Every structure is written in C-alpha cells, then in structure tokens.
Amino acid sequence: MGVVYRAFDETLEREVALKVLVLETNLDREIRRRFVVEAKAAAKLQHPNIVTVYELGEERGIPFIAMEFLSGMDVDMLLRSEEPPLLEESLEIMAQVCQGLAYAHSRRIVHRDIKPSNVRVLEDGTAKILDFGIAKLGELTLTQSGMVLGTVHYMSPEQVRGLPLDGRSDVFSAGVILYEMCTKKRPFTGRTATEIFDGILHAAAPSLPQDLLKRAPRLRSVLERSLAKNAADRYPSASVLARDLTSLHDDVLGARGSYETMEAVKLVDRAEKLVKEGRWEDAIVDLSSQLTQHTDCLAVRRALRAVKHAQTRRQDHAEEGFPELLSAFGAALQTQRATAILTKPEPRMRIGGRSMLLLGALLLIFAITAAVLLHSDASRKPTRGAAVKPPVTTTQSASAISRDGVPVSDEAPASFVALRIESNPPGANVFLNGIAVKGLTPLSIEVERDQAHRIELRLSGHVPHETTIAMTEPITEELRFDLHSIGPLTAVVVTSSYPLDIHWNGRVMARRETSPRIEIPRGRHALKIEASEYFLRWDVVVDVAEAPLSIAAPVLGRLSARASPDNCAIYIDGVFADNPPMHGRPVASGTHVVEFRWPDGFRTRKTVDVTADGVAYVFGRREENP
C-alpha cells in the first residue's frame, strides 16, 4: 500500500515515520481513499498501544501520513529472530494488543487486518498496533459487495465469507497470532488461499504441545474461545480477552519466577556502552553467553534482540541510495542522488505546510529585490512629481502571507485578527486548518476574518479536540479548550537536585526541570531520564498505580582525572568532558566509562564507580593498553 520513511519534523523537532503511497498505487482511487481512511481512523485513537498519527497531507499529488517513529521490531520479525519470544512475553504482548483493540472498538473502529507485521514491539516490551489501512470506520464500508480484504492466514471466518464485521473479528485474528507466538506455527495452513480459507472455516486449530499445556493449562481454553468459528461463541470483547491473558501471564510468571537480577541489569548496561563504542560483536558475545546460561532472562533476551536488529539496520543503511524514493516520486527526481534528497530535501518536500514557509521566503526575496531595483532606478533617473513609496515588507501569519498587512493574493484584501488559544491542561499542539502551528498552548495565532477556520488541539494522553470557528461574526479573541484525559492518569515525580529530561513513549515529557512532575496512564511504563550535563542516561521501568509515584534520580558525586602525558581529551561515557587535569567534575553517581584520547589515536579506557556525594579518582597512562 505504501512506503514508510524515517523523517524529521522540523516544526516540532521530532522524528516521525512518514508513509506515502507508492507510484504504482497512486492512480488507484480505491487505495487512495483507503489510505485517507487509515489516517482518519488512527487519528481518532490516542492509546499507549496504538501508533499515534500526527498529520495527513499531500505533496506533489501524493498523500502522506506522518506518524510517531517507533523503534523495536514487528512480531513477524520477532518470531523469525534467533531469540523468539518466551511464553510469558507472548502473553504480555498480546494482552497489550487486545487492550489497544478494545479502545479502538469502543470508538466503533474495527482494524480488520491484525497480523504479526502490524504489531510493533518496542525495546521495553511495549506493543503498538499499526496500519488501520482497511479499518471499518463507523458505518463506512470500504469494500464492494463480496470483496475481501485482509491477510489470509489471520482472517476471521466471517471475514472470509464477506459478512459484516465487528470487534470479535479482531479477537479471532489476535487468537491466531497468540497461537503462532506460543507454538511458532500458524494454526491454519495450506498450499493455496482456498485451502487456508477452508481451514479457517471448518478445521480446529492443532493441539498445543504437552510441555506448553503443562506450563499454562488455561491457555487451551483461552485459544479455543478466541478461535471459535461462530462469533457468538467467541470472547464478547477484546477487553475480556486482555483480562484473561493478563491473568494467565501472571500465573506463568509466578510459577517459574524470573532471572532479572542486578547481574543481568549490569550486563545490559555494559552491552549498551559497548554499542556506543562501536563494539557490536563484543556486546553480542557477552549477551549471548549470558543467555545460554539463563535462557529465561527476559532483559538479556530483549537486549540481544535489540543489538542484533540495530546492527543489521546499520549495515543495511550503509548501502548507498534510496531507490524507494524514486519509485514513490517518479522520474522528476531521477537526476538527483537519493542521499541528497534526504539530506537536502526539495523545497516542497516538507511536513506541516512547509511549502507556505518557502513561498513566503520567495515572496520576501522578490519584494526586497524589487524594492532595491526600484530605489536604485529612481536614484539614477529621478522623475518629476513621482511619489516616494516606502519599502515593501512581507509578513506571515498562521494562515496567510501578507505584504504591508495586505494579503498576497488576487482576491480582495482581508483583515486579520489575533486569537489566543489556551488549553487545560496546557502544552498541546495546535493545528490550524490541518497545518501545524509552531509552539504549544498557550499561544497566539493570526487568522483571516470572514472565513471559517478549523482548530485542532492534540495532547498526549488526551482526546484530540477539534472545533470550527466562523470569523464572519464578532467572537472572543481568547479561546479556551478543556482536553479530556484518555484514561486515569497518575503523577510521577522524579526528585532531583539538578535539571532532568524525561522521555516517555517517544515523547519529551519534561525538559531541563528540577524534580520534574509528569502525568502518565496507569500501568507499567519505561521512562528514559537524562541529564547530559552530568552524564546521566537512566532507563527505569515504573509501575504506575492510582497513588502518585515518586522516584529519586541518582545523587551527584564528583570525578577527578589526571593523565600522563596530559595532551589528551577526557571522555565520560563517550561524551567529551574536559582536558586533564580534571578536578571534581559533577557526575551522576553510578558506573561510568572514562576514556583518554591522545592526538595520535591511542586510547585508554577506565571504568570507575562514582558514589553519591563522594569523589572518585581515575588516572590514564599513555603506555597502558586500551
């Protein structure tokens, strides 16, 4: 249906996944319409287990969707990896998928294409549902009579028959994925689509292996109910299935215990540092060795997957050229190098109305040039009685470009009014007529009078709010919107004596705040807490309940370093810190790697433990081996 690129939104300064239709499907009206419905369906869904859609637009006649950029790998890749998911991991992933589906179903949206490649698993274990490309939005039917859409192995019986669908169809597809994740085999197979369809309609799923039933006896009943041929015999909703999967996960995990010791945590941290140093193979060897001894260690298993996957992507991206760009945008780009397209985008290849900004820049250049030429010509050949005109200036508002306050247009002049937009809570992104406005609420924008304008506010964890204002009548120049929370939120406070950045779910929740307070939904979440000034990069998993949660950031210690000879640079955890001698540099307590780099390329590494409120010393000698 499309090609997805890793892109950067310069307006909001964030990485995004940019999905565009490929050239071959560009002329297909049905696929084009389905592409738009995908964005509209997903944009209505703001849930931790569903990919977030930022924007729908069109460039050079090609529709695109800007979505949050997700790391990790699809379940399809996960099943084919050398470290397939453990039973409890499979149950946890599918419980999250069902929670996301339950939320979508409550908004009258049926996915209709749940399959392993449409479920993304992040490094911390969070599952995200992707691609609502053939979703049924309310009562809007995308298919013609008798037309079947979906992926054959994961279709429900009613989907195979071309019958009306509800959320129980997605429950069946989720059951197929669960069976495959637990057994590493698909329940319904065949050499042709007809044989697969026959199995879905009439055959029971193969029996589960005895060792699997011994570990999880209730798994059989869960799968039988999920894969019932008659929708009435199936789980009535995805939320009920999610509840049973969560309970089953707790039983399995409680029966075997877990090997998530400090030894495993230290090993994962060491692997991350080796990757930073470019020592990919060393990291893989360390993790593989540990996993051989403790096959049930989920932290090490996930870390090993992530390192291997990142190394593969790094090698793939080293190859020159991006042929997908040419296939998407056609022969107009054939004369340019594909790498140049990504590093120096064409003026119109922007996200969020960049073409308006460039048009304004061109008009500004044109206006200034014209003014200079007119002024120069007038100074050389004065004309009797000629009026002196002031220089022309060009300004840009959120919705129009004007010259000396007059819109640059062939239409009649229009006036503008300034609107102040506030939200409760603040910090929401604002979209005016589908175009992202720079900044977060509260903010002021300018809009044209005598026209209707669509204003949309989006804030993570809250239901998007959209309204249309008609500027044909006098209205208040201050608009305030209450944004409703998606679900119960709980405050998390990270106490610290120094400024911190907090990242959650790919979003910046706090930037350079001392003891920052954020609000996130209840449940288990991974937070990335950073303070680059003090060499802190802390990944922590928190269990958020009803009561506010408080965690303490590492206390600062001090680090002193000397070197012989001292004509070198000191790096802490791969980041330049100082030149020797370094006296009492404030550093977050914990284990750090100190590296001394001399001009001839010689390097010496030292590992040092910095204690809270203490001073650590490290010495680098040129003659030592690295």
Image: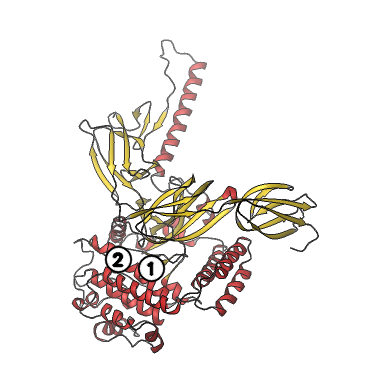
Image quadrant where residue 212 sits: bottom left
Q: Residue at x 41, y 66 (%)?
A: 120
Q: Residue at x 38, y 74 (%)?
A: 250
- According to the picture, the residue beneath numbered tag 2 turns out to be 101
Q: Amino acid at mark 2?
A: Leu
Label number found at residue 44? none
Q: CA distance from mark 2 to mark 1?
A: 11 Å
Q: Nearer the viewer, mark 2 or mark 1?
A: 2
Q: Secondary structure at mark 2?
A: helix
User: Looking at the image, is mark 2 or mark 1 earlier in the sequence?
Assistant: 2
- According to the picture, the residue beneath numbered tag 1 turns out to be 119
The tally of labels here is 2
The correct choice, above or below, for 377 with respect to 74 in the image is above
Most foreground residue, 453 or 192: 453
Q: Residue at x 30, y 45 (%)?
A: 456
**In the rendered image, which quarter contains the N terminus?**
bottom left
Q: Is residue 62 visible?
A: no
Q: Residue at x 51, y 71 (%)?
A: 260
The correct choice, above or below, for 195 with respect to 50 in the image is below
Q: Amino acid at mark 1?
A: Val
- Could you classify mark 1 by the number of other residues whose Cα lies within 10 Å: few (under 14), some (14-19), or many (20 or more)? many
Which x, y percent locates residue 518?
Answer: 41, 50
Q: Secondary structure at mark 1?
A: strand
Which x, y percent locates residue 449?
Answer: 26, 32
